[in-house]
Amino acid sequence: MTTQLPHEKGFHVSWDQLHRDSRALAWRLDGKGPNDGEWKAVVAITRGGMAPAMIVARELDIRTVDTISVKSYDHQDQSSKATVLKSPDAELVGDGTGVLVIDDLVDSGKTLEVVREMLPNAHFATVYAKPKGRPQVQSFITEVSQDTWIFFPWDMALQYVEPYRGR
């Protein structure tokens, strides 16, 4: 049995694809808010949720956007507990009623568990979802296997690649 490295089962997401999928998420959320179908605010989970949240807020004409910063893993210590580094405006978000919490991906679900404790009545939506974290979101666009590594456009750089058959 060979062990695959995380990048060997990769799902590469371009800026165009992220934009299309984020717009699809907005369309899925349109008219689903508790206030006659409207949402009062978007809370983006930094850093990955910021681009999708911007697109969703634009598509749904939501002018109030805030962020929450959660450190849910450490490359050196995979067992580290998720901690909130920056919270959204408590007066604005309250218990989360009418608030969309947006992230790029739910993987293990650790990040969203911490945010859900703070905003139990928010609607949690991600662009991509893995099975382990899937129960933490009410809305998502694409599910990928747990062992798939998603390469987001902000993590990538363009570089030359040798042709498959060599020179």
Image (tube, rainbow, N blue to C red):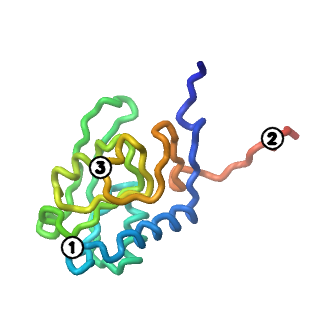
**Callout 2: SS:** loop
The foreground one among 101 and 121 is 121
Q: State which tag comes first along the sequence, 1 or 3.
A: 1
Q: Which residue is mark 2?
A: 164
Disc 2 to disc 1, how far (Cα)? 53 Å
Quarter of the image with the N terminus is top right
* Mark 2 or 1, nearer chain start: 1
Residue 141 spot, x, y in % from top left: 45, 59
Q: Are marks 3 and 2 in contact (CB under 8 Å)?
A: no
Left or right, 147 with respect to 41, comes to right
Pick whichever of labels 3 and 2 is earlier in the sequence.
3
Looking at the image, which residue is at 16% across and 54% down? 118
Q: Say which quarter of the image contains residue 56.
A: bottom left
Q: Nearer the viewer, residue 22 or 78?
A: 22
Of the residues tagged 2 and 1, which is closer to the observer? 1
Q: Which residue is mark 3?
A: 136
Q: Say which residue appears at 36% left-offset and 75% top-offset.
A: 30
Residue 119 drawn above or below residue 144 = below
Which mark is on residue 34? 1
Q: Residue at x 13, y 62 (%)?
A: 95
Tell me where residue 63 appears, x and y as whole percent. 30, 78
Question: For the point 36% across and 47% down, which residue is it?
Answer: 134
Q: Amino acid at mark 3?
A: Gln
Question: How many other residues sit within 10 Å of disc 2, few (<14), some (14-19) or many (≥20)?
Answer: few
Most extreme residue toward the top is 1
Secondary structure under the numbered disc 3 in the rendered image: helix
